[in-house]
Amino acid sequence: MDTEQLRASLEDTGLTQYEADAYVTVLDLGSASATEVADASDVPQARIYDVLRKLESDGYVETFHEGSLHARVRNPDEVLEHLSSYADTITNAAAEIEERYQQPKIENHRVSVVKPLDAVYERALQAIADAENELQIALTPDLFDRFRDALTDARERNVVVLLTISPHTRTDYETFTEEHDLDFAGVATEVRYRRLPTPFLVIADRQEVSFAPEESLHPAHEYGVHVNDYSLSRMFDWTFGTAFWELWQVIHSERDDSLPATYTEIRECIRDIAPALEEGREVIVTVYGQWRESGEDCQLTGRVTDVTFTGQADGSPLLATYLEEATLEVASADGTVEVGGWGAMFETVEARRIVVETVSRG
């Protein structure tokens, strides 16, 4: 390190330009008068006395009188300790900057655009770890390996996990299974295969969304989006349901015909119980959700007395089922209550989870 670099480094630790210049000069001279220090440095004669006294008060030099004011360097142990501490601080600051860059804080933002993709994945993993009710996920086999443990933990917490798996390039399922041997047991409630490349998507408890587009042509173009907003996340829910879920092949399911049966999607629940209702059979459900007007949590159990569902009776296209009402009428201890799904606008209760407890025999 040359003299100029040493001076610049000392300035970085808090010395002024004149202080750094004077200290390096005294360091080189060993011991010298104030006038000699000024002559050998760029410190003006009018400032040299104040500069040396400031260096003395900070522990860099000591001054003495030998006809005139002289200065010599103090034992550098204290200075070296200060510099080492400063170096540690800079190292820690660099590590903190890297960590904050990799894991940006977005709790106070509704929408954030984030780079790099690892930051998107880490935020998604945190959302999965915090989920209490439902996860809707679309990812590739490589990412499945990365997320497997987190999804397994979620299932162990009784979180409903709806997973769409998709290839990097358009691939039929038979070819896909030859290339990938994936075990979904204990990882997801239901898995569907979408043969087209699909964006990365995680929707957690109808609130948090982590999204990244399909693979970019260049790493510099990679980005992700985090959404932490109940209303905005519904847009991603519609995308998941219509483009990533409904039309695609079921390749794994933990569901069977046994009861109780748990649903987080009201339309799916209605489709499954509609035949029993049409046959006049009694269907008992427990609804976990919130009163729409107050926002308070609620739980009610009762008999389903009626359903409203666009796609049920007239054979309308599947997309229409996402655009129209989907309502259960439940006769409970609170009277007959209308129950809607995510974003219910007219119903009394917005359901987060519906459990079909019993269905009477025909």
Image (tube, rainbow, N blue to C red):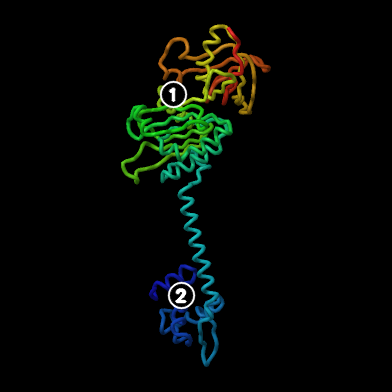
Q: Nearer the viewer, mark 2 or mark 1?
A: 1
Q: Which residue reaches farthest left?
A: 217
Q: Residues within 10 Å of mark 2 (few under 14, many from 20)?
A: many
Q: Which type of secondary structure does the marked residue at label 1 adopt? A: strand
Residue 179, position as x, y percentages in the image: 36, 34
Image quarter of the N terminus: bottom left
Residue 79, position as x, y percentages in the image: 52, 74
Count of labels in the image: 2
Q: Which residue reaches farthest right?
A: 333
* Residue with the mark numbered 2: 20
Q: Amino acid at mark 2?
A: Ala
* Residue with the mark numbered 1: 250
Residue 217, position as x, y percentages in the image: 31, 41
**Residue at (46, 50) in percent of width and height:** 101
Q: Amino acid at mark 1?
A: Val
Q: Residues within 10 Å of mark 1 (few under 14, many from 20)?
A: some
